[in-house]
Image (cartoon, rainbow, N blue to C red):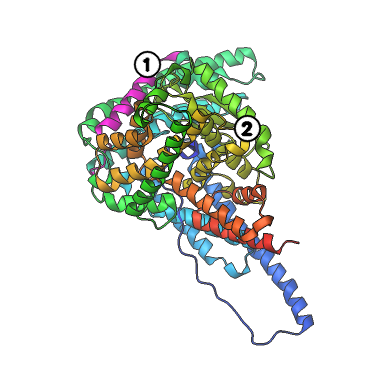
Amino acid sequence: MLDTTTQGMTRGRFWAGALVALVLAATLTPPPVHAQAAATAGDSAASAARSEQAKAVFDGYWARTAELFPESATYRGDHRFGDRLNDGSPEARARWFGFARDVLSQLQALPRQDLGTQDRMSVDVLARRLERSLSMEPFAGYESMTVDASPWPFQAAFNELLRASPVSTQPQVRMVLARMAAYPARVEQAIANLRSGMAQGWVPSRHVLEVVLQQLDTQLAKRGRSSIYFEPFDRLGAAIPEAARESLRREGEAAVGNQVLPAIRRLRDFVATDYMASAPDEGGLVRYPGGLKVYETVVRNETTTGLTADAIHAIGLEQLAKAREGMEAVRREVAFAGDMQAFVKHLNTHPRFFKRSGQEVLAGYRDIVKRVEPELPRLFAQLPRAPVGVRAIPEFLGIGAVESYNGPSLDGTRPGWFNANTLAYAVRPTWAMEAIALHEAVPGHHLQYARAAELGDMPMFRRSGGFTVYSEGWGLYAETLGPELGLYQDPYSRFGFQTNQAWRAARLVVDTGIHARGWTLRQAIDSMSAATGMERTRVEWEVDRYISQPGQALTYMIGQLKIIELREKARRALGPRFDIRRFHMAVLDQGQLPLDLLERAIDDWIAAQMKAP
């Protein structure tokens, strides 16, 4: 799971619209040879000019989004706006949609026939992002629900931003202090948005808000220099004189105590009183005004397909049955005497399957990454330069928090990070660790994000984020590569892989069940527990997440199935010329794409491979 780079912003910013129809010119007879040469030179000059025109649109979009969403700029490695937070007012939301429409009109005005293949792809990718964002414009009530049980909700976003903020120099520290000073006003905007959504009937369920309150209370429990918000001042740059560092620490401590924590207290008090009093007992979009329309839009945006909720539900059941067969095969392989239910209980309770501390969890994941990295050239023709580290998830997110990944900055100053849950060592079994490491680190999210960051010939917006169905589809696909990378030698690790497949298949069933079929929280938990054999605490947290992030859980399996489909398509077309190393680069070297554009890119790659000598 990833990406924290867009937290604190609206849920669906990027969109696109239909491109202008092509105007094609044709002649009945070819021109003379000398005229062809002149035309070729003219075409080349026109193409270069049109490419520059497109580049100006791309660069303008990128620059403006850095100003509108300075948090995102920080994650990119652009620290010009590191003293600001995004404007969370309704007026700012309206300005964003106006800007999105303006960029779309610029894309539509580009003469597509004069653009090169890569520029046309970039136009289509940016247009699709903008279309996706604008499709959410009517749903302000839904988008108001920013405090929830998703992995990185509003109440967790500021801490994560501070962890990504550089503090090597005094000016950089001053920027962090300025953001702390701005945080109370940003929280007031968030509360105002929550109130507005509440008036329209949009409030998260009571159970989700109980999770929110637990997280807020944990943040408020530690003050001063022990607060999580003091973290930047524990890593001040060595180039700052010690006397100045101590002075900055005192300022940071005061900012935490006088600005950040009081703002969090106000948010907590609002959630515990007015907001909680309006919360429904159950979540699920089908229960909200116009919620089914919202879900239809979210499903289309998240999967980048025309699949209906019913079709996705059926795919989930089919894939779940396959994964369960794999789980049963492992049970038979180890000659376990009991049935699957007893086997799952054994795997979730026997001491041999658990670490003894959070530090052992970190060491275990680091060992897996270390073993995988030397094997990667067997499956990838090129590898990114940026390293990946393994660190603990912030404790306030709780024992049920899922592992996640943060990508490297585009300027190369920050590595990628695999965030592991070190609190859950006593309840989260070790047999799932190999599959999780493949997904979150290498060759999963880190290879994908770090490679994209280094695609210097791509527009910047294509090198950073984009489409969850691509990113999570790739992460889940990466889990299937374990045998080729020397993992899953142990049958219990193979069970972990099959369980992860069942988990992602069950997501298709549970997400659509909650949001389109009106399943209760209890129905969803019972269904996922029975289907996957995952420990109960994790299942409960997962279901809270699906309630909070409709549609996101659909992206993993839908994306993985498409990548596997395209791989087999390429294998059939190329026969002995098929090279898995080159295929993987063809998938990764386009940045994140919606699935139809990914298929177009792979079709082009297949055609090029067939023509190669």
Quadrant in the picture for residue 390: top right
The number of callouts visible is 2
Question: x%, y% of residue 227?
Answer: 44, 17
Residue corresponding to mark 2: 372
User: Can you tell which mark lies on residue 159?
Assistant: none
The residue depicted at 38 percent of the width and 30 percent of the height is 534
**In the structure shown, which secondary structural element does the residue marked by tag 2 occupy?**
helix
Q: Main secondary structure of the magenta part?
A: helix
Q: Give the position of the C terminus as an image quadrant.
A: bottom right
* Whole-number angstrom distance, CA of label 2 to CA of label 1: 39 Å
The residue depicted at 52 percent of the width and 55 percent of the height is 126
> Residue 87: in sight, yes or no?
no
Which of 120/253 is in front? 120
Quadrant in the picture for residue 149: top left
Three-letter code, disc 1: Ala
Q: Residues within 10 Å of mark 1 (few under 14, many from 20)?
A: few
Three-letter code, disc 2: Val
Residue corresponding to mark 1: 221
Q: Which residues are magenta?
A: 200-224
Question: Where is 256 relative to 52, above or below?
Answer: above
Which of 25/505 is in front? 505
